[in-house]
Amino acid sequence: MILPVLNSIYFICSFGNLFLRFLLFVFIKFIAFPYSLLRFYKKQGGFVQFFPFAASFVYDIKDVQTHKSFFYRDKQIIKENPNLKFLATNLCPSCYLVLADPKILKDFFNQHDYYKKAEMTAMYKNVLGNGIFFSEEDSWERRRRLISKSFHYEFIRAKLPYIKNIVKEILDDWEKNS
């Protein structure tokens, strides 16, 4: 008679212990770790926003719905703080940075080997492919060299007649169909 009761108590304690371990894991992974990273970024001179779990995503969705921009809140913060170096916020266990200082941006683009793209980009690669925004190191550099020629002044200037014709065709089509 006492053995089944002891087994039940042991099971409850084991389950409770597992549950407490799970809660501790969730707390460390989704709250303590991102919070400590954001404290580090704050000491570096950034504007920091901490959102437990994925709460920032809720605000981002509202920004898209009301202002048609996923980064509306970030743009407003940068506008209000013109000397800001960067913004840092968390999305679940990861932190992401929005660079605002031109010197840091220049360093980011010139020293791209030192910066790793976010793990989250893997999710977008499936949808958008492995273009310049999601490629790493050698393939990024190769793609950037290829595309940079398209943004030289002379190249754009030579294409202006084509651009004007295409825009005129689109406007004429809109006018005809409206």
Image: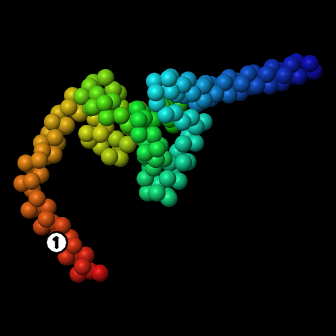
Residue at x 54%, y 42% (from the top left corner): 56
The image quadrant that residue 174 belongs to is bottom left
Residue at x 28%, y 28% (from the top left corner): 107
Residue that label 1 marks: 169
Quarter the C terminus occupies: bottom left
Q: Amino acid at mark 1?
A: Glu
Asked whether residue 11 appears in the rendered view, the answer is no
The image quadrant that residue 78 belongs to is top left
Q: Along the line of sight, which residue is nearer the eye, 20 or 149?
A: 149
The reply, left or right, for residue 134 in relation to residue 59 is left
Asked whether residue 160 appears in the rendered view, the answer is yes
Quarter the N terminus occupies: top right
The image quadrant that residue 158 belongs to is bottom left
Residue 128: where, in percent of width, then height?
32, 46
Residue at x 88%, y 22% (from the top left corner): 5
Residue 162: where, in percent of width, then height?
10, 62
Residue 76: where, in percent of width, then height?
46, 47
Q: Tell me the SS state at disc 1.
A: helix
Residue 110: where, in percent of width, then height?
24, 28
Is residue 128 positioned above or below 172 on the image? above
The reply, left or right, for residue 142 in relation to residue 37 is left
Q: Quick one: label 1, few (<14), some, or many (20+) residues within 10 Å?
A: few
